[in-house]
Amino acid sequence: MIKFVISSLCLVSIASALDLPSYIKPCKKDDPNLNDCSLKQTKLAFPFISKGDKKFKSPPLNPLLLPLIEVDTGPNLKLKMTDLNVHGLDSIEFKEANFDTKANKAHFTLSATLNFIGKYEIDGKILVLPITGDGNCNITFSGGDFTYDMNWKLVEKNNKQYAQIETYKLDMKLKRAYFHFENLFKGDKLLGDNMNMVLNDNWEEVMKEVGPGITHTIEVVVHNVVKAYLEQIPYREMFV
Ligand SMILES: *[C@@H]1O[C@H](CO)[C@@H](O)[C@H](O)[C@H]1NC(C)=O
């Protein structure tokens, strides 16, 4: 079970219609090279999007603040992370931005290294070892390859068509993950250093426990950003 709160991101109502901002250039929906256009425009627009845009209620992404992520893997492990600052979203490298305007779906692939710095509380067992502690943490997703898939339906509002996202999914493959939990075992340095070493030596196993909670949170953040733009700009302004 995963709980998370993204209080800095307000839910956007489709009622507000906004014009295409100057940093987003439309693509032609029937362009045989629509994918090239989409990728090029995504790359050009992202530095502006990642700064945040109040008009679209889109938050700054560098760093991105995640107030709370709770990972609760049954009776075995409780992990709570608060005030996480996510660094690295500004250096995302987009590889593909494929829009299928007939099937109303899009597929993105991108790579990034993400650094999560914040506070943690952990209690339970990980890799069958007891673990407990609270303090500062540093989690790094190194060499991450991400795919993001979504589809939408077109809805009519005040005689204009808008895309309304129906499904979205983020997948992630990492080259490595690094963990550093300060102040484990009430500050016992020997036990803490050992545990951090064990976590890093077994990063793939650890990711199975803590990864989904973090990935799902990023998935929702990305969704909210995409939604902010896609659902407030008339479809025909983006795909002319
Ligand atoms: C977090 O950990 C990564 C990987 O070990 C390291 O490169 C980075 O400098 C650390 N950042 C902080 C703020 O400690």
Image (cartoon, rainbow, N blue to C red):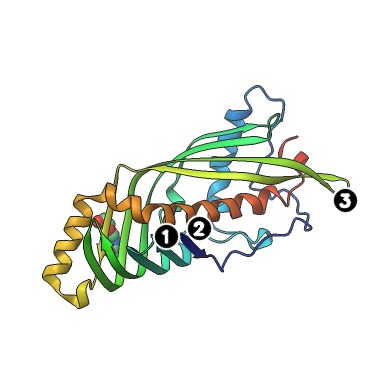
Q: Pointer 3: residues within 10 angstroms few (<14), some, or many (20+)?
A: few
Compared with residue 4, is residue 212 higher up or lower down, i.e. above or below? above
Q: Is mark 1 within 8 Å of ligand 1?
A: no
Q: Secondary structure at mark 1?
A: strand
| Amino acid type, label 2 | Leu
Q: Nearer the viewer, mark 2 or mark 3?
A: 3
- Of the image marks 1 and 3, the number of the one nearer the N terminus: 1
| Amino acid type, label 1 | Val
Q: Residue at label 1?
A: 86
Answer with the quarter of the image where residue 135 lies: bottom left
Mark 2 and mark 1: span between their CA atoms? 8 Å
User: In the rendered image, which quarter contains the C terminus?
Assistant: top right
User: Which mark, residue 24?
Assistant: none
Q: Find residue 65 and report its horizontal and vertical position in percent.
A: 47, 65
Q: Residue at x 64, y 63 (%)?
A: 54
User: Which mark, residue 61?
Assistant: 2
Q: Residue at label 3?
A: 158
